Every structure is written in C-alpha cells, then in structure tokens.
Amino acid sequence: MLGRTANGLYWMFRYIERAENIARLVDAGLRVSLTRAGSSDEDWDGVLQSAGVREAYSEVHPQLTAADAIDYLLRDQSNPSSVMSCIEWGRNNARMVRTALTRETWEATNEAWIDLKARLARKPKQADLPELIDGIKHRCGLIRGAFHGSMLRNDLYNFSRIGTFIERADNTSRILDVKYYVLLPAVSHVGSALDNFQWESILRSVSAHRSYGWVYDGEYQSANIADFLILKVQMPRSLAYCYEKIVSNLGYIAEDYGERLKAHETADAIRSTLKRSSMPDIMDQGLHEFLEDFVSRNNQLSAEISEGYRFYH
C-alpha cells in the first residue's frame, strides 16, 4: 500500500476521533458549569487545557468567557482542533483515499461534514448545545459503524484503527493530566457535591460514567477512577485497552508485510509498562509524571509509524 494512502486513513480516523472527543469535553464543561452558583467562565480554562488549545485561544480572545470558549472549541476554523476543523480535515483525508474506502464509509463521512457544516454555520444558542453535541457524537458514531460493518480486515483497516486508538489514548491521558489535581482533592472537598460533580465530569468526558458505576458501584474514589481510565483493559477508552488494540493492529500489519519496525518495539514497550503497572506504583511515581511520560511516548510511536511506513511518500 502507498504511504500516502496509509497516511490518509490514519489521519482520517484520528480527526474523526478528535472531533468526538472535543464534543465530549464541551459536554463535560457544560455539565460542570451548570453546578456553579456564580460565573462559570473559569471552568473553561481546564477544558481548553484538556483540548491542548489554551494558549492558542488566548491569542484570539484576550478574555476567557464560556461563550467564546465553546465557540472556539466547536466551530472556530482558526483552531485546528475545533470540531468543524476536525470534521473538515477528516473528510478531506477520506476524499484523498476515497477508492480505499467502502461507499458506506465515504457517504457517512460526507454526510457528517454536510450536516455539521450546516449546524455550525452560526454560533449555537446555549439551549441548543446538548442537541448539537449529541448530533456530533451521533455522526462520528455513524462513520465508525459504517466502517466496521463494511471494511475488509486488511492493512487499510489496521492503519485506520491505529489512528483511532493513538488519538483516543492521547485524549484520555491529557484529560487525566489536566484534572490530576482533582484526583488529589483538598480534604474539605472530599465527598462534597463539588467533588462528586468533578468526578462525574471526568468520567463523562471519556464516556465512562455508567461503565464506571458497573465496576465500582458508583463510588467516586480517586484511585479507582485513575485505575479505570489507565489500567482497566475492559474499558474501551482506557490507556490499557487502546494499547491492546494498537499492538494487535500493528501485529497484523507486520504479518502482512513480513517485517517488524521500530514502532512495534515501542508499542510493545508501552503496553508492557501499562500491564505491569499498579495504581500504588503510579501514585508513588506521580500521576502527572506518569501521564506526561505516556503522552510523550504515544507521540513518539505516532512519529515512528509515520516514518516506518513512509506516510508521505
């Protein structure tokens, strides 16, 4: 397969995953802001940091307001990580590799772009945001569903899946890293309504609220939440689950191509770190330090995949 085809599929699914992740972050920010008695503008600082766009936002908006933050995250095309930018880049990559996609996958991607471009053409009203966010998640889910239901399980499929899970692992680790101070709460806040809403916002932002309740009977405890989102391999947005899938899909590509590259060793090493880690070990090392190292290694793997499979040739 040509490197540019692999590149197009990999980044198509990274952008689709990122669009949904940003929508979920906005949803979490809205939920937290609704629990505040006063101004909720400062709550959006953490949301912008989670999205990795806090500094870029400041260049466009001298003051932080909820309305501007939401608009920047959802529809500002000067923000390369806004939902609209991601959907557009995802669709552009899909168009570039259209002959490598099934008709169902292409149509789901194109329809998502048409629908969301119309919905995000103007600033949404506050009352319309829940429906808009649900629409974004629905459209991204349709793309994934069409893809899973119609694509041949070959190298095209594997590169697409690797893009999805590298992006998902990056998102989960960044959310946890930005919120790590919440995982070490002030004694005065433990068990309070504020404490519980902060936990809920973290879990909802990675689609883990209900599944966490099934495993831990709904008790919000810092060690349990970190364990669930880092090490619990049954949780489809945990770091451990993402790396099981990344290693698996890289393995299939190695079988198809008859060679293993540096990226395979890096992915195996990251999975091994996650498999042998425990929450006491991670907390002793420092949650922030652990997550910072993870983000760096995840980015390294992405670069090695790009170089090893000649994405730009």
Image (cartoon, rainbow, N blue to C red):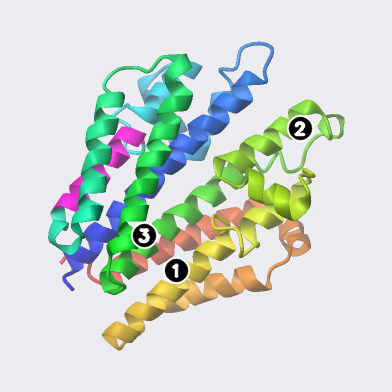
Residue 81 vs 127, above or below: the answer is below
Secondary element under disc 1, as helix, strand or loop, is helix
Which span is picked out in magenta?
A: 82-95
Residue identifier under label 1: 246
Compared across the picture, whether 311 is left or right of 171 comes to left
Residue 271 vs 178, above or below: the answer is below
User: What's the residue at 75%, 27% (across, down)?
Assistant: 194
User: What's the residue at 64%, 72% (across, down)?
Assistant: 275
Q: Earlier in the sequence, mark 2 or mark 1?
A: 2
Label annotation for residue 163: 3
Query: Separation of disc 1 and disc 3 at Cα?
Result: 9 Å
Quarter residue 272 falls in: bottom right
Q: Amino acid at mark 1?
A: Ile
Compared across the picture, whether 111 is left or right of 200 comes to left
Magenta-span inclusion, residue 92? yes
Return the x and y of residue 44 as percentages of the image width and height. 54, 25
Q: Residues within 10 Å of mark 2 (few under 14, many from 20)?
A: some
Q: Earlier in the sequence, mark 2 or mark 3?
A: 3
